[in-house]
Amino acid sequence: MTTCPVCGRHGIGKVGADQYYCWDCCVEFMVRNQDVKIFNVEADGTLTLYENLLQGTVNLEVQKG
């Protein structure tokens, strides 16, 4: 089970190899080994790097099973 690194919820869909979309907070993220990159999905569908200025950190829980 994968949780969103931004909101921590489980409403995650897989959109590609190691790429996920959170239906709750509408971000896309990539997980490769221990690296996580988070992107905002813009109105035109482009991805821009997500910057969470309030928290400064992200939480990621990836469980294989």
Image: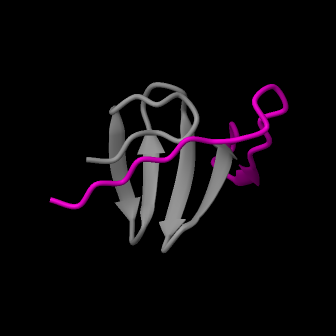
45 w.r.t. 9: above or below: below
Counting the numbered discs, the total is 0
In the picture, residue 17 is in which quadrant? bottom left
At which x and y percent is residue 34? 53, 68
Image colouring: one colour
Residue drawn at 69 percent across, 53 percent down: 47
Q: Main secondary structure of the magenta part?
A: loop
Q: Is residue 38 left or right of residue 64?
A: right
At which x and y percent is residue 5? 53, 41
At which x and y percent is residue 59? 55, 41
In the picture, residue 43 is in which quadrant? top right
In the picture, residue 23 is in which quadrant? top left
The residue closer to the viewer here, 21 or 42, is 21
At which x and y percent is residue 44? 69, 44
Residue drawn at 14 percent across, 59 percent down: 65
- Asked whether residue 56 is drawn in magenta, I would say yes
18 w.r.t. 14: above or below: below
Q: Residue furthest left?
A: 65
- Asked whether residue 51 is drawn in magenta, I would say yes
Residue drawn at 55 percent across, 53 percent down: 29
Q: Which residues are magenta?
A: 41-65
Residue drawn at 81 percent across, 25 percent down: 54
Q: Residue furthest right?
A: 53
